[in-house]
Amino acid sequence: MPVYVIVQGKIENRELLDQYVAKVIPTIECHQGRVVAFDEQPQVVEGPIEHPRTVILEFPSMTAFHAW
């Protein structure tokens, strides 16, 4: 059964984020994971949003996720 990881955050330093992403994507892929979606400027229908960046990762199993 697939496992989904949902992360929310706020970008404070784009350069550091780009360096992090360049290093973390290969580790995700190495464990058969993938980035399903990400959004930096969501349209909010109701209520405040504190963390405008959302990333969704998918792993094929809990074992693969924990190995990552």
Image: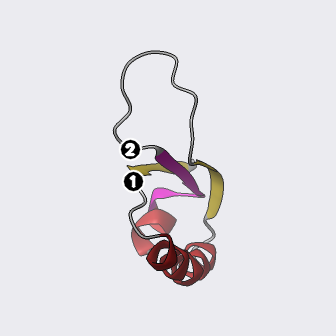
The residue singled out by tag 1 in the image is 10
Q: Position of residue 31 (x, y in %)?
A: 57, 74
Q: Secondary structure at mark 2?
A: loop
Q: Is residue 53 left or right of residue 49?
A: right
Determine the residue positioned at 61% across, 81% down.
Answer: 26
Residue extent of the magenta highlight: 53-62
Q: Position of residue 4 (x, y in %)?
A: 51, 48
The one of 65 and 14 positioned closer to us in this rendering: 14
Determine the residue positioned at 63% across, 74% down.
Answer: 29
The one of 55 and 16 positioned closer to us in this rendering: 16
Q: Earlier in the sequence, mark 1 or mark 2?
A: 1
Please say whether residue 14 is one of the residues in the magenta stretch: no
The amino acid sitting under disc 2 is: His
Q: Position of residue 28 (x, y in %)?
A: 56, 72
The one of 50 and 54 positioned closer to us in this rendering: 50
In the picture as drawn, the residue positioned furthest to the top comes out as 46
The amino acid sitting under disc 1 is: Lys
Up the image or down, 50 lies above or below 7; here it is above
Are circles 1 and 2 on residues that touch, CB within 8 Å? Answer: yes
Q: Quadrant of residue 68?
A: bottom left
Q: Quadrant of residue 22?
A: bottom right
Give how far apart the Cα atoms at labels 1 and 2 are: 5 Å
Q: Position of residue 60 (x, y in %)?
A: 60, 58
The residue singled out by tag 2 in the image is 51
